[in-house]
């Protein structure tokens, strides 16, 4: 994603360079400057190339002299920040940067102007015309020695929503009593994120851990290395979840048992990596090891164990439970005795739990572990990791079963949040492009198997810029949230609503009744979005243009189906807006579609 933004910055910079070259060749200052030697057609040709990239972009482009004074500001500054270009030209480029960020940004700038051809990337807060601080990612490039530029070209990409999401996620991650991480695979893996809990659990700060790619491998217990590496490799090959336990050596030398649960994330332009959670299970391991010792040791650990422990008979009735389990499930002392595991287990998990228990008694397995849901006394759900072992009498006959229950409710909630945030738009909570394309692929596969029909509708707001101009950034965001809500309300629960970016939405209709069904859905959308909208205490009207692309064979790719819907949507706009168009083969050539996108 970052690489994609940098390619866009390069395009903007190259186009700006060409504009300034035209400017210098004609020795003028602006098309309307009226100075001798200016050729309006030459300016228009160069300027059009630049404006075609910037007019719909949410990015800003500036050129600063070596003294930090703004020499150029792209037109998008008025739409994005609300400033007139004339208010900014000739002023310091650092004047509206947050005081806490201004010093580091200026220091980077000074270092950059001393590095011909150099490039830096930073993040900072910038105040808009309404006095609101907004976050931007800035890529600066030293072009002081480039003919016709002679300055530092800075590209600004707004990341305010991302920063807000990161802050919310940081509070969630740091509140979980486990290590949340993102890392590549292998003995010399790069860890791109590790939460602060690594310090109390393993004795290292996040900075120390991430700066040394070999630290994880060196602290991994030698006896567990090959097994752990094999688990990683198997997960990568099968694209499945890791669930393993291994020993790590704490900074001070003592052993820490960790349970590692992670998912494989396939990057679009990078190798696959793991995103997961490391839970300290040292206490549980001590309990498990001690269960093989004498009855006296067993009793001591049973009563003082920091996790839930219970004994059940061969009919799953609770014989005894420790205080921790009683508190976890909301029962008083001794109240669990006599209840069956069926009474305490979530209905949807009872079948698997019963199956594994019977396999334990029949000798098909010596023990088992699984994640399951328990029902607390008040009816709420406890997510737990259960370890079960069968204890036998002196003659080897099954006597009773011991279970160790670890509360993982907070961790499961975090995993759910991480999965949701990875595939949904943070503003509208609609699906993002990655999730939409995945669901389109699934729909196309079903078409091929079951002869179903699917449709993709591209929905674009007409004159969204006017709403932003009238109501500001907050009003624009409120409108986008309302549009997403109305789209969901006008469709079936099985259909997918996605936000592709800006004011552009997409809808996936599965198992739709041919073109008739898709057209009926488009008409419902036009009707729903045609109703007046309350924004910031005022009422306004909006309209949308809808492009429809059908798939009845399943042979298209998600990219092709979205492109066809995009073409039809532009045709709808060209035909007067506030309407829909159905894509037909031969409607437009690829070159014409690319021209529509420009």
Image (tube, rainbow, N blue to C red):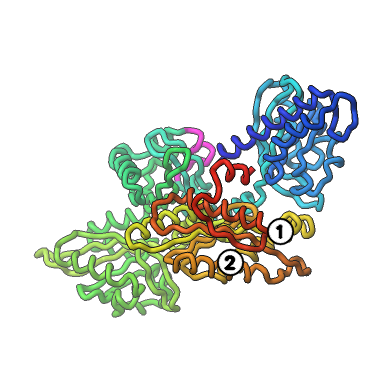
Q: Is residue 515 left or right of residue 61?
A: left
Q: Which of the 4 image quadrants contains residue 295?
A: bottom left
Instruction: In the rendered view, tell whether residue 300 sits above or below residue 81.
Output: below
Among numbered discs 1 and 2, the one appearing first in the sequence: 1
Q: Which residue is mark 1?
A: 476
Secondary structure beneath label 1: helix
Visible residue check, residue 252: no
In 3D space, how far apart are the residues under numbered discs 1 and 2 (Cα atoms)?
Answer: 17 Å
Image quadrant containing the N terminus: top right
Query: Is 461 contained in the magenta span?
Result: no
Tell which of 252 and 363 is nearer to you.
363
Q: Which of the 4 image quadrants contains residue 2?
A: top right
Q: Residue 487 got which mark?
A: 2
Visible residue check, residue 205: yes
Where does the image place residue 147, in percent across and percent down from the top left? 74, 20
Camera-side mark, 1 or 2: 2
Query: Which region of the structure is painted magenta?
Result: 202-212
Tell which of 276 and 553 is nearer to you.
553
Where does the image place residue 507, in percent across and percent down from the top left? 53, 61
Where does the image place residue 31, in percent across and percent down from the top left? 84, 33
Query: Is 204 contained in the magenta span?
Result: yes
Q: What residue is at 25 percent from the left and 70 percent from the top?
A: 354
Image quadrant containing the C terminus: top right
Mark 2, other Cα within 10 Å: few <14 / some 14–19 / many ≥20: many
């Amino acid at each position: 994603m970052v690489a994609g933004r940098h390619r866009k910055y390069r395009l903007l910079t190259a186009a700006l360079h060409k504009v300034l070259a035209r400017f210098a060749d004609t020795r003028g200052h602006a098309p309307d400057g009226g100075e001798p030697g200016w050729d309006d057609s030459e300016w228009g040709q160069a300027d059009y190339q630049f404006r075609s990239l910037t007019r719909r972009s949410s990015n800003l482009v500036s050129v600063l002299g070596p003294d930090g004074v703004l020499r150029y500001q792209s037109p998008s500054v008025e739409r994005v920040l609300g400033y007139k270009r004339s208010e900014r030209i000739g002023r310091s480029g650092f004047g509206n940067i947050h005081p806490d960020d201004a010093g580091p940004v200026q220091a980077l700038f000074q270092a950059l102007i001393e590095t011909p051809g150099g490039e830096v990337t930073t993040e900072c807060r910038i105040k808009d015309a309404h006095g609101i601080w907004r976050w931007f990612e800035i890529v600066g490039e030293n072009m002081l020695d480039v003919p016709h530029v002679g300055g530092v070209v800075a590209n600004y990409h707004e990341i305010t929503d991302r920063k807000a999401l990161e802050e919310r996620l940081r509070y969630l991650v740091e509140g979980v009593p486990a290590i949340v991480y993102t890392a590549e695979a292998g003995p010399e893996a790069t860890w791109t994120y590790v939460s602060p809990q690594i310090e109390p659990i393993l004795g290292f700060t996040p900075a120390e851990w991430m700066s040394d790619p070999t630290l994880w491998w060196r602290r991994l217990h030698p006896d567990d290395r090959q097994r752990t590496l094999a688990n990683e490799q198997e997960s990568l090959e099968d694209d499945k979840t890791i669930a393993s336990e291994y020993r790590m050596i704490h900074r001070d030398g003592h052993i820490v048992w960790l349970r590692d649960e992670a998912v494989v994330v396939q990057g679009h332009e990078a190798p696959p990596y793991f995103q997961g959670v490391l839970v300290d299970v040292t206490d549980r391991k001590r309990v498990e090891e001690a269960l093989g010792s004498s009855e006296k040791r067993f009793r001591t650990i049973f009563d003082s164990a920091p996790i839930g422990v219970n004994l059940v008979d061969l009919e799953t009735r609770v014989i005894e439970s420790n205080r921790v389990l009683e508190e976890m499930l909301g029962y008083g002392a001794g109240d669990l005795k006599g209840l069956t595991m069926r009474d305490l287990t979530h209905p949807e998990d009872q079948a698997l739990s019963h199956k594994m228990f019977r396999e334990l008694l029949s000798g098909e397995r010596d023990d088992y572990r699984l994640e399951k849901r328990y029902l607390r006394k008040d009816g709420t759900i406890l997510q737990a990791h259960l370890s079960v072992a069968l204890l036998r009498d002196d003659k080897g006959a099954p006597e009773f079963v011991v279970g160790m229950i670890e509360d993982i409710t907070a961790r499961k909630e975090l995993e759910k949040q991480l999965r949701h945030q990875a595939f949904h738009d943070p503003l509208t909570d609609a699906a993002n492009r990655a999730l939409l394309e995945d669901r389109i692929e699934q729909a196309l596969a079903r078409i091929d198997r079951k002869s179903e029909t699917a449709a993709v509708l591209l929905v674009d707001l007409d004159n969204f810029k006017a709403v932003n101009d009238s109501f500001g950034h907050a009003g624009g965001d409120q409108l986008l949230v309302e549009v997403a809500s109305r789209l969901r309300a006008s469709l079936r629960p099985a259909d997918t609503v996605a936000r592709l970016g800006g004011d552009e939405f997409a809808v996936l209709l599965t198992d739709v009744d041919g073109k008739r069904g898709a057209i009926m859905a488009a008409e419902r959308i036009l009707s729903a979005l045609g109703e007046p909208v309350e924004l910031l205490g005022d009422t306004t009207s909006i309209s949308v243009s809808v492009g429809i692309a059908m798939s009845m064979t399943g042979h298209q790719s998600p990219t092709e189906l979205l492109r066809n819907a995009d073409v039809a949507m532009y045709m709808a706009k060209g035909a007067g807006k506030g309407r829909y168009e159905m894509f037909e083969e031969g409607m437009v050539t690829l070159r014409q579609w690319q021209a529509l996108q420009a």
